[in-house]
Image: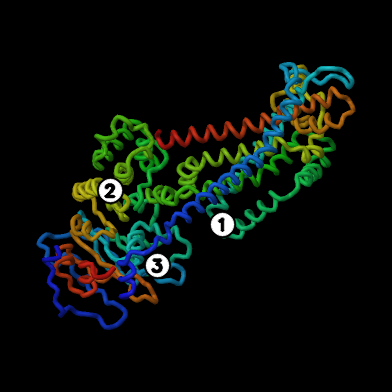
Amino acid sequence: MDSNLKMTEEKPVSQSPIIMPLQPTLKETPPAAGREENLETKIEIRDFSLYYGKFKALGSVSMGVPSNMITAIIGPSGCGKSTLLRAVNRMNDLVPHVRTEGQVIMDGENIYAPNIDVVNLRRRVGMVFQRPNPFPKSIYDNVTYGPKLYGVGRKTDLDEIVEKALRQSALWEEVKDKLNQSGMALSGGQQQRLCIARALAVEPELILMDEPASALDPVATLKIEELMQSLKDIYTIIIVTHNMQQAARVSDFTAFMMIDSPQTRTGVLVEYGETNQIFTNPKLRQTEDYVTGRFG
Amino acid sequence: MSSTTQSIGAPSRRLVFSKANFRRRKIVNGIMLSLTGVLTVVALIPLFWIIAYVIYKGWQFISFAFFTQMPRPLGMVGGGIKPSIEGTIVLTTLACLFAIPPGILAAFFVAYKPNTPLGIAVRFGTDVLSGVPSIIIGIFGYALIVKPQGHYSALAGGVALAILMLPIIIRTTEEMVKLVPQNLREGSLALGSPEWKTALSVTFPAALNGIITGILLGIARASGETAPLLFTSLGSSNYSIERIVQVGLATHQNIFQIFLNIVEEPCDSLPLTLYKYSQMPYPELVSQAWAVALILMILVLAINILSRLWVQARVARMQGR
């Protein structure tokens, strides 16, 4: 990959400590620049800022996430990648003293509007975490936890949901004979796929993945990555990852985030575009430095 | 820079791994190891001494009749401690009923909202309560229930023991709830589960082992207490559930009335009987006091051991082994 990169010195370098995010203007379908296909925008983040008390963790992030694509968010530690991801299903609400500005629009509706039902939002936006977190229940109960929450009670319906979700997460063949075993007894990679099945079981439209493979070995990581490719036909996926190779392998679009300055430590979106372009022909110097491993 | 490279390259005396050093370390290691071993044995002596002495003094009086018979009048040989056993069961059950539900709920509140004024107050209150001498809790039970009602009762004893158990249950439950990984809770919330549902169906089962250990520790503590009962359940050597039930049935009382009668009478308990008998000028009763001490010790030990085994089994099952 490195050989493809042209290290030219004429890259625009912003002089001010505040990095101006370079990105497609919102008038056009944001990341579609250069794409033949017509992309539908699933989530549009508009001028979104987030504060933890007085600390500004995210500064005016704007980006559109296209439907049925995998969008990766990369960047050094502490640049607000996870915060941005958690803004999409409002998991940040759980942190005390959180304040937001701007909008996150999903299918034409601002999810930060006062009339939004967070429970329903979280059903539509599933989440997979960094560490596999199966509940200390059986595999079956792990998958049915969500559907039961939304009132599915018939055993036959639940059985169907379990099989479908486990098949989608490529776990069915491995666990179909031991659905009553504890989810904690599975291997790390299987646990993570169980967590994906658990998220799929409530039929979400969008899946957020917060470094889903960082606690897994290479084989399990590969399985998760293959799984993501197969899920992309049905779901829209946003993945936060530390692993740049992973972002390059799995994603269609990549957003690069960084802190604006060491003093304020506010996370900003530096560059956003097609993955291929970000990794082979980044428009900004910071992006190039990061994807070539010269910093971060 | 250059001198460092030279000294690494040049052969030199082995300073760190010299033979003398090695021998000295071995000797010091031996001394320290035997010291810790000896002191561990010293620390265990009182424990085994107490257990051995109580068994030696008490075992010969323990028989089936000792558990099932009522006490004989003073000066007579034989008789049992049935009222104390029944009383202990009634008192402990009452204490659990009063202490467990509020204790667990308070613990969840403190664990979830530690920095709210109420959360801080509850935590502070728990700390203070766990340091209050148990005799004062007895007086409190007296003022709260015995005085207004005009008579001693098992109910008052149960309340006093519940107050004693409360801080133990709140503290252990809070710790156990906090130990449940944050990402389990987030996993549930991310599926759209409301906070109360998450607490009930994810956090509570995950913390259940620890919660039950806390409850059992509370029971072990409460069932061995004498002081709070002196002012509340007082002690009664003719307390008999069988008699109360029979009287109740004979006078056509309903179940609720019979239950009330059971908790409204003053009752004995193992530690109360031990305290009473050991002061008696009759050798027979002093011997029985030793037997009661042995039973109490076995009871508390059994609760502790069983709770540990049970938790181990549950943890193993949860992890699917």
Tell me, yes or no, whether dots 3 and 1 are on the same chain: no
Q: Residue B167: x percent and y percent?
A: 65, 47
Quarter of the figure with residue A285: bottom left
Q: Does any portion of residue A191 appear in the rendered image?
A: yes
* Same chain assignment for discs 2 and 1: no
How far across and down, in percent of the image, does residue B163 sit?
70, 44
Mark 3 and mark 2 lie on one chain; the one further toward the N terminus is: 3
Mark 2 or mark 1, which is nearer to you?
2
Image quarter where the N terminus of chain A lies is bottom left
Please rate how many residues cluster around mark 2, counting C-alpha atoms within 10 Å: few if below 14, some from 14 to 19, many from 20: few
Element marked by disc 1:
loop
Q: Mark 2 falls on what kind of element?
A: loop
Query: From the viewer's perspective, is B218 left or right of B181?
Result: right
Please report contact status of discs 3 and 2: CB closer than 8 Å, yes or no. Answer: no
Of circles 3 and 2, which is in front?
2
> Which of the numbered marks, if any, corresponds to residue B209?
none
Of A7 and B140, the residue lying toward us? A7
Q: Which residue lies furthest to the left in this view?
A: A36
Residue A8 drawn at (x, y percent): 14, 76
Callout 3: residue from which chain?
Answer: A
Q: Circle 2 is placed at which residue position?
A: A217
In this image, A50 relative to B162: left or right?
A: left
Task: Report the Cα–Cα distance between label 3 and label 2.
Answer: 36 Å
According to the picture, the residue beneath numbered tag 3 turns out to be: A100
Give the image location of residue A161, x and y in percent: 30, 37
Disc 1 marks a residue whose amino acid type is: Pro
Q: What element carries label 3?
A: strand
Residue bearing the label numbered 1: B114
